[in-house]
Amino acid sequence: MNEAKLRGAMGFAMRAGKCIAGDFACERAVKRGNARLVLLDTAASAATQERYSGLCERAGIPCVAVPDMGRAIGKDGRMVAVVTDARFVQMILDASASEKNAN
């Protein structure tokens, strides 16, 4: 159920237009300061994971690893997404924390 809550929150953010998907667009959003949370697929390459963890660290924003992230937001094949709204960020972080506590 916790995974369903996490996937639901991510889907809501995408449908509300508060989520940007795709490598180039996400990197640009982080560098411009528009990103509040980075969602990274667990299947992303090591280079992509390192690059985004570095970007997030420098920008001071959280980065959450999610299995099969692209499918959760309705964009199969996307490895990275950015959430731009603080309320959706809190919803996703709460769902992510409850999923980790359940395991």
Image (cartoon, grey):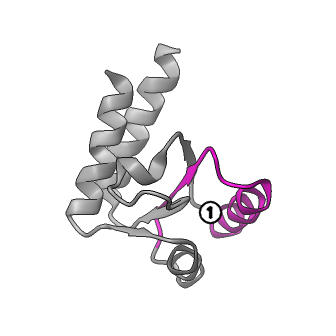
Q: Position of residue 70 (x, y in %)?
A: 44, 54
Is residue 95 shown in magenta? Answer: no
Please give the name of the residue rendered at 48% of the width and 62% of the height, measured from the top-left corner. 81
Question: Circle 1 — which element?
Answer: loop
Examine the rendered structure and indicate whether residue 59 appears above or below residue 79.
Answer: below
Please give the name of the residue rendered at 43% of the width and 42% of the height, measured from the top-left corner. 93
Q: Quadrant of residue 42?
A: top right
Q: Position of residue 76 (x, y in %)?
A: 42, 57
Q: Which residue is mark 1?
A: 60
Is residue 50 shown in magenta? Answer: yes
Q: Position of residue 79 (x, y in %)?
A: 56, 59
Amino acid carrying label 1: it is Gly
- Of residue 27 and residue 75, the one placed in the foreground of this image is 75
Which residues fall within the magenta stretch? Answer: 35-60
Please give the name of the residue rendered at 70% of the width and 61% of the height, measured from the top-left corner. 57
What is the residue that sits farthest to the front in this orientation?
77
Q: Is residue 15 left or right of residue 97?
A: left
Q: Is residue 50 left or right of residue 70?
A: right
What is the residue that sits farthest to the left in this orientation?
16
Q: Is residue 46 left or right of residue 80?
A: right
Examine the rendered structure and indicate whether residue 43 appears above or below residue 81.
Answer: above
Q: Position of residue 41 (x, y in %)?
A: 57, 49
Task: Count residues near mark 1 (Cα–Cα under 10 Å), then give few for <14, some for 14-19, many for 20+.
Answer: few
Please give the name of the residue rendered at 34% of the width and 40% of the height, measured from the top-left corner. 7
Q: Is residue 55 left or right of residue 6?
A: right
